[in-house]
Amino acid sequence: MNRNVHCWVARPDTLSAHKRSVVVALLATLLLALLLAPAAAEPTSILLDDFESGIGAWRTNDSTVANQEQLATLCGIYPTSMRPPGGGAQAAMLDFLPARNAWASVSLSIDGPTWHNSQIGQLSMWIRGAERDTSVAVTLRAKIPTPQGGFQDRSYTQQVQLSPTAWQHISLRLFGFQTRDGIALDDETLPHLYLLQFVKTGTWKRTRFYVDRIEARPLIFSDQPPLPLADEHKPIVVDLRQELGRCLSQVGFGVSRDVAASNADPTKQRRMATHAADLRPCVGRLRTADYYDDSQQQFDLFSLNEALKWLTGIGIRPLLCLDMPDRDKTSLDRAAVWEQLQLTATKVAELNREAKMAPYYELVAPPAPDDLDQVGDLIMSYQRFFSLIEAADHKAVIGGPGLAVVNRELIEETAGAASMSFFSYHLMLPGPTWPDDSRLASAATTGALSSLEWGYEQIARHLASTIHNSELFITKWGVEQPWAADTAVRADQETADALFLATSALSASRFVDKLLWRDLSDRTSGLLDEQGRPKPAYWAAWLVSTYAPRGASYRAYIERPDNLLIVAITTRTAANVFVVNRSPWQTSVQVEVVGAQPPAIVREHRLEPGQANAVQHRNLSLSNLQKIEFQSSGISVLQFIPTQAQ
């Protein structure tokens, strides 16, 4: 640090020796004091959020709720598994839905006095848009004291143009923030800042963007370079010489009462039957609770049996979920309904014991009246139900979740006591969700919604070591998407459904025997829409069923931090490499297959919902090195067919 020192020094030749020594000593002392004086502390930055702990510190508000204690409807902030260049495992996605004559904000509390003491002069962040030609206002709010003793709330704003082509590191100088009247943010206002906001006002189209590592920095700041990104041009090597296991999974679906009803629209029903049949071999799940008729105080056995025939008629094996109707849908007490359920299950077993495709029976109802709350009593009641079905059809395949979702002791006691043939559980991700949702990636790859739950592999390995010859079913599987009126949001949700289905099915394939999507046809999260037309999730199911069939060899599983999952499956006729891309923007992927014969045919089967409504097929060059260009989120299957397989 430069210091200017002004002092008078006499000429040495005018001083005596004694005086000269005194002056020299004084100068030495002064220089030593200057050298040892503490330098001013270098200004440091303030990390506002890097989103590694989620988005809990942020709040949303808009003109539809106006500061009420509820979530905004026009905007939201969500953790995302996007690859943030600032380092770390996740970033945040902000989504402003289309609106007219409105306002919406996503806000984070900040500490103005700390900013002032730290000499903050700029706001920096990593940011990337999702759509072209969009912008967002970055706003700093201040509470300015008034002479009357109150406060004036003042907003200082800068507009940021959002680019979807790449992450950008931006630094917004604080003196560039201005009020609507053109008043610039100055040093005197700095201690009064209390809120950082991303804001949309007026009328806007949908605006989505990603942010990471938001910092408040001094103007003079030694910036560290971002962490280097992996070389995107380096091929991902897929080795087919390894054997990871066998594909077990079959992708099926739940069937609501109206889909298989005898009075349903015949054109729509034929369309649904055709699409459902294309997923064979698979299982369709019916629920007895859907067939309870409280006016008759019994289950509608005729309609239930017609639905079973509809499934077997198109070559799909039924799974009958023996569950109780909700309490508000019955006038009988629970014990009487429980007896009716047992009688219905016995009748169904008797009627179908000679069927070529006899149903699976899933015991999921509370296995006893409410007053039986001891585990031993529950298991005994469960056993009696099991015995009734087995007596009606000694070949019946019976299973269920037991008395707990995942609990080691109860799995063993219940399944062992009843000699269950399969164990079942549910995997339903709460919505809304989107393609690069970090929750979607975690739940789909592990089979659990939290680290406290068992997933595909843990349950399968435990069953294999304790209950021999027992299979694992996920009988309610998918995403609980809310209805979205906006078509763009709905398209995002449907794409997310497809990515969840493909990622989950490929991750579970070595451990889970049956995966049953929540509904064949449904307004929000069905494989088909209400008119029986395929949605992206249906085509994802078709790709998995066609190119990763039960019995195929599982060769490679590569989960990458850049929202890519690569899985290799070999059949007798081809090597099929799945590339699941959850990134919402343009992505280039190079795949190099090793351990395979030179191909005679290479084909790509691609589902990219943002570009087409169905699977697209095309021939590729005859090479084991292939480059895929995604325009948005999607699924690609590279099929390598050797000469002798033609």
Image (cartoon, rainbow, N blue to C red):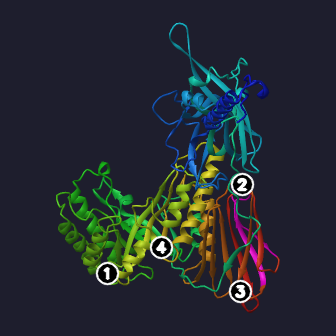
Looking at the picture, which amino acid does disc 1 mark?
Answer: Asp
Q: Which label belongs to residue 86? A: none
* 197 left or right of 283 in image: right
Mark 2 vs mark 1: which is more N-terminal? 1
> Which x, y percent locates residue 208?
66, 43
Task: Between residue 201 and residue 108, name the one nearer to us.
Answer: 108
Residue 244 occupies quadrant: bottom right
Q: Which residues are magenta?
A: 600-620
Does the segment drawn in magenta span residue 103? no
Residue 200 visible? The answer is: no
Closer to us: mark 4 or mark 2? 2
Tag 4 and tag 1, C-beta contact below 8 Å: no
Other-residue count near label 3 (Cα within 10 Å), few / some / many at <14 / 14–19 / ≥20: some
Instruction: Give the class, few, some or many, for how many residues have Cα within 10 Å of label 2's Cα (few <14, many ≥20).
Output: some
Q: Indicate yes or no whether the magenta region holds residue 614.
A: yes
Which residue in the structure is indicated by mark 3? Answer: 596
Q: Which three-letter amino acid code belongs to the residue tagged 4?
A: Lys
> Based on the displayed image, in which of its 4 quarters is residue 297 positioned?
bottom left
Q: What residue is drawn where x is 25% and y is 65%?
A: 367
Residue at the outermost bottom position = 644
Name the residue beneath numbered marker 1.
Answer: 393
Residue 129: percent from left, percent from top = 71, 45
Picture disc at residue 514: 4
For mark 2, give the secondary structure: loop
Give the label on residue 585, or none.
2
Element carrying mark 3? loop
> Is residue 227 at least partly visible in the picture?
yes
Callout 1: SS: loop
Frontmost of labels 2 and 1 is 2
**Residue 386 appears in which quarter of the rendering?**
bottom left
